[in-house]
Image (cartoon, coloured by chain):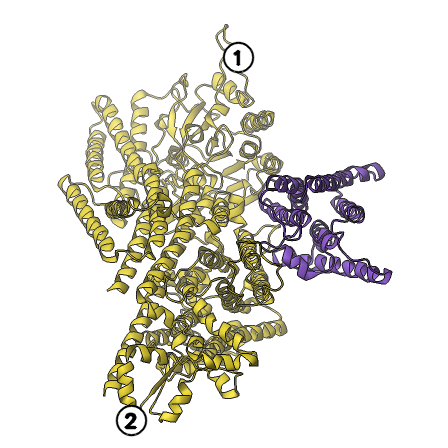
Amino acid sequence: MKDTDIKRLLYTHLLCIFSIILSVFIPSLCLENFSLLETHLTWLCTCSGFVTAVNLVLYLVVKPNASSKRSSLSHKVTRFLKCCIYFLMSCFSFHVIFVLYGAPLIELALETFLFAVILSTFTTVPCLCLLGPNLKAWLRVFSRNGVTSIWENSLQITTISSFVGAWLGALPIPLDWERPWQVWPISCTLGATFGYVAGLVISPLWIYWNRKQLTYKNN
Amino acid sequence: MQKASVLLFLAWVCFLFYTGITLFTSGFLLTRLELTNHSSCQEPPGPGSLPPGSQGKPGACWMASRFSRVVLVLIDALRFDFAQPQHSHAPGEPPVSLPFLGKLSSLKRILEIQPHHARLYRSQVDPPTTTMQRLKALTTGSLPTFIDAGSNFASHAIVEDNLIKQLTSAGRRVVFMGDDTWKDLFPGAFSKAFFFPSFNVRDLDTVDNGILEHLYPTMDSGEWDVLIAHFLGVDHCGHKHGPHHPEMAKKLSQMDQVIQGLVEHLENDTLLVVAGDHGMTTNGDHGGDSELEVSAALFLYSPTALFPSIPPEEPEVIPQVSLVPTLALLLGLPIPFGNIGEVMTEVFSGGEDSQPLSSALAQASALHLNAQQVSRFLHTYSAATENLQAKKLHQLQKLFSKASADYQWLLQRPKGAEATLPTVIAELQQFLRGARAMCIESWARFSLVRMAGGAALLAVACFICLMASQWAISPGFPFCPLLLIPVAWGLVGAAVYAVLLGTIELKLDLVLLGAVAAVSSFLPFLWKAWAGWGSKRPLATLFPIPRPVLLFLLIRLAVFFSDSFVVAEARATPFLLGSFILLLVVQLHWEGQLLPPKLLTMPRLGTSATTNSPRHNGAYALRLGVGLLLCTRLAGLFHRCPEETPVCNSSPWLSPLASMVGGRAKNLWYGACVAALVALLAAVRLWLRRYGNLKSPEPPMLFVRWGLPLMALGTAAYWALASGADEMPPRLQALVSGASVVLPRAVVGLAASGLALLLWKPVTVLVKAGAGAPRTRTVLTPFSGPPSSQADLDYVVPQIYRHMQEEFRGRLERTRSQGPLTVAAYQLGSVYSAAVVTALTLLAFPLLLLHAERISLVFLLLFVQSFLLLHLLAAGIPVTTSGPFTVPWQAVSAWALMATQTFYSTGHQPVFPAIHWHAAFVGFPEGHGSCTWLPALLVGANTFASHLLFAVGCPLLLLWPFLCESQGLRKRQQPPGNEAEARVRPEEEEPLMEMRLRDAPHHFYAALLQLGLKYLFILGVQILACALAASILRRHLMVWKVFAPKFIFEAVGFIVSSVGLLLGIALVMRVDGAVSSWFRQLFLAQQR
């Protein structure tokens, strides 16, 4: 592991953060009366789209796991389709988990689903980009001593921090402050976003500080 | 011996908690008995002639009425300085300008222009300064405390004698407008009423504008005798903005206009009273006892001259309750029975131009009536309860009889009255003030010392739990001395305290006595712990922090300090539980216990210690987790709101089936309930069969086989009768009513007899004896290979084999040589948990009967949920072969969390109106007569059913991992390739299951003690947090609405849980003892 790797990691993460910031400001240029809280669903869609696009572009440009073999076009297409299916599956399973956690079953179903989409964007899309549609690899990365590169390590950190952010976002909902952001699922989506951004910022720093201790099997 | 000491130790810790709770409660919730006696016109409060002028006049009662009509304007939270006239300042001083000062300028003007007509007082309010309590005080003249014993918790209606009741029984028309709290307090008492919702504190104007719309038309219509208008705007403005906000100036100016308008509308026979019910702090809150909260304004105005003198420079300070006797006598009504206020003598003097003597005589007669009434009340009250101090009461009685005699003497000799009158008035006033002071002392003060002491005791008890739970599993835990020394010291301390009190002749307070005993017992314990432990090892081991659950515990405790979270706890607890479960699954995955190692890439060098292969595959734990989440979510459908608001609607499934209209839907629901019942029964039987205990011929298992279905049948029949009682033909009515008495009692009786059988013969094993030698060979061969049908049915757990080998090897050899007598025992491996599960089922049925029918679905979910949780927890706990056994913190806290979640999902809420009162009538459709403990028991069992069940089931947390051992082994034996291997090493493959615990009895008891202490710690920390929240937030707006009820429910729940825990552990001990004696008998049988 070299410092250049960490630098690359940092730049890609900064680009991701930049895309989230853009997703707040660009729609307000195109759309009238756009605001983060009032037209929250629009923002969710744009944010999800931006982050996915940036992740894909970064994956194509940076190619963190360059070791993957060259393959035919049809293989790539099936791989892409598989990724799409995985993404949808993760959206639905997140939706189910939210409902199990107490989200309303019928009312606000669209809101809940878009929350599932944004959380999938923060967690599943990077996983798909980095690891491909390979559940075993995912399980490996998210277990103790399972990571094999700084990319996987940062993936671990950003994913966990997105989940924690979304979880923390649910805590202020019962408070009687009557703020517009306390409405389901706004606090959770905001929490997930902040958690994702925090993960993006923290993971390069954490890896930099612990670069002496970190030894990866494959590097 | 050790068993008893474990139980006694737990009981001692519980005692520490109980004393802490009672000490705190005695300082926080002061109780007062509500008397239902009423004053009446015909019955004067005492002997002696009624004052002159009262006889013969129409409409006069104890005294001639001075006003025929009253307008009472109640401005919520009108602090005294809001109404205080602002005098022009000295020229040098800059004028103080605050939004709330000097806005009621009409008061100032009236006081200056008509000094004999009006008077402003600073009324001293008694805490708690919440509106409901103040309204009670302003109408009954008493000091309402939070718990007025004897009151009906289901409704807030005032049962004591009060002004409104006196007015209506005298035929006066009372018109009310404003705060809808009055609707609950005086249902149906008003001849006309305009209620407006008081719930939304952010709405400043709805109530006030609504009143103003009706106020003047009603006044002008003349169809009233007493007009009450309760304005809320000032109070809401205080809560929303605080008093230092320009909005407050606007609100007060509006009130000023109201007063101005009223004065203009008044007729000559009408009295205007403007009163604040309490004050507010500088933040605009109220509820506590700070100076700003307890000073309210009181303003009287009469169109005719009322006062003999001009108002003093600084307004007089009077107790708020003085208004009650004054108003009653001014209106010619009897003073309410429980009043302890003192009449305002000034208003009885008869205007500015009356004779000094006659005015003083009128004052004395009013005071005397008042004193007679208070004396009668004190007499009745002290006869009914003992919480007044006898010594002081005696002094007061003496004072009263002297004053009364003086007054009578004075009436008989009008000459020379001028000299003695002032002394008589002074004596009467002294009596009244003394009586009030005594009542305040015993009713209306937070005792901060007691609250702090109680909280400290609770904290120490928690600490002892934490410390001892760590200590208990260490080998050198000195049971007996540790137990005996504190108990001895406690007794000594209590005795010394009692003797000390006896010598200085003070009344023995049981609460304090308990506290002294607790303190004197834990001090030596802590000292011994410090001496025996602190010197040898580092301090950190003495204070074990439950690190794995610390975050969850902190979140859970922080919840108690926020009123929104306490209200939303029904939704927050499943969320927390779900997070906890998912975290457990993720943790299992993270630790690599779910994945076979081949999936993982090679671990890093140096950390290749993960040699123990996973006992389960990942999908197994995930399935358990998802199943748990699903159960939690489904149980959440049975949600009850703490308060019916437009935002929150209770689940319609909580109501009994009898209230349903649709016949088809009712039948379907009934079917579902019965199905749940059958499923519960079948699940328990299936479980027992799986571990083979059902095959045992012992009486408890016979009961499970035959008695339980009978109980289910009885329950189903009772439901059918209860839900369809109205549709029965009249001929069957008698039969139905008879059956609805008999059936519940029969079910309870069956359950009790089942429990008795279980206690009598708790060992549920199947013994086969007398088989031939070749047969024994097959029995003793451990079960291995793919299960054949027979072996699968009665899964053999040949525990006895090893015990025989270890304990009676020699005897066995001899008997075998003598003759082919061998013994095979089955199901020893699950003997403890079978007893606990059976007990839980037997407990669940009567509890189920106390709930509405559809809650049976929740009970089914409860059993499924705890089953899944136990499996999930067991998946994370490695089976320790030979002690010390330990239950991890995660397991205990998840269990406690699930108990709380079930409390909510069975349709309960920690508020008094949400209690299921109908439970008191299950089996007693006609009520209970004068018996009070039985309905209390029934309602309590209904409310705390989940606490009880989970506490009794707590030992399962320790037992379950051993049960799952067999499962893991069976799974591993499934592949046929292992068959040969298994045959090679038969003895190692033998699942010992719970007999491992018996192999190390010392560790077993220590583990039980540790489990109990950990559970008590988790519950104790909750009650500590509740107590701290209630005491820290005692000035909070919601203290009497949210925090105090939460504390009471939590405290009672703790007591129920601790008793249940002791019972559960005692049951396991009993089973253990029975197993030992069973072995002994076997041993004797072998000898023969």
Q: Is residue A105 visible?
A: no
Q: Is residue B212 left or right of residue B376?
A: right
Residue of label 1? B95
Q: Amino acid at mark 2?
A: Gly
User: Residue A189 or B573: which is nearer the viewer?
Assistant: A189
- The spot of residue B765 in percent (x, y) is 37, 80
Residue type, label 1: Pro
Task: Using the image, determine if residue B663 lies above or below residue B655.
Answer: below
The one nearer the camera, B104 or B474, is B474
Which subunit holds the residue at mark 2?
A: B
The numbered mark at residue B705 is none
Is A34 placed left or right of B872 in the picture?
A: right
How far apart marks 1 and 2 lie (CA) works out to 113 Å
Q: Quadrant of residue A34?
A: top right
Residue position for label 2:
B819
Chain B: drawing colour: yellow
